[in-house]
Amino acid sequence: MSRRISATAPKVAAVLAEIRLRSPNARKFVVGYPQVLPDRGLGCWPSLPIGFGDVSYLRARAKELNRMLRTQATNAGVGYIDTYTPSDGRSACASPTHRWVEPLAPANPAAPVHPNGRGMAGIAAVVAGAVQ
């Protein structure tokens, strides 16, 4: 998975370079991913059926992906907006009334392992705060 993240970096760089060419005067931002798995613990089997031993590995890859996005944003001279930190405690393992990301079997009208309405609103608030 780390190789795939590394292989994606030049693609992100190319997209950011093309955006710069097409919109040289626009303010540009890369928005990172929110927490899918809790930052601590062993996940939330069976809501998110990931083996307990794999949770820390996947958590580390999510952080690695966000670091890569931040690095590419910095290298391209564009802003990076962290949504991982503000979503702490709001992963797919949080209660249905608190989480920003749905588990594999969503309790809300959202795609599995994607932001729900609360998550979209929370991320939008983070983005709005960062761009003002």
Image (spheres, grey):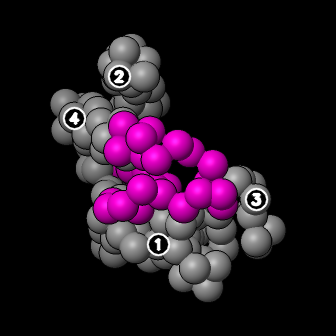
User: Does label 3 or label 4 sit earlier along the sequence?
Assistant: 4
Q: Which residue is mark 4?
A: 71
The kind of residue on which mark 3 rests is Ala
Q: Which residue is mark 2?
A: 2
The kind of residue on which mark 4 rests is Thr
Judge by depth and name the residue closer to the eye, 62 or 124.
62
Numbered tag placed on residue 105 in the rendering: 3
Q: Which residue is mark 1?
A: 90
Q: Which label lies toward us, 4 or 1?
A: 1
x, y (%) of residue 132?
Answer: 31, 73
* Residue 60 sits in quarter: top left
Residue at x 43% of width, y 32% of height: 19
Q: Does the CB distance between marks 1 and 2 fall below 8 Å?
A: no
Magenta highlight range? 29-58
x, y (%) of residue 90?
Answer: 47, 72
**Magenta span includes 31:** yes
User: Does label 1 or label 2 sit earlier along the sequence?
Assistant: 2
Residue at x 32% of width, y 62% of height: 40
Q: CA distance from mark 2 to mark 3?
A: 27 Å
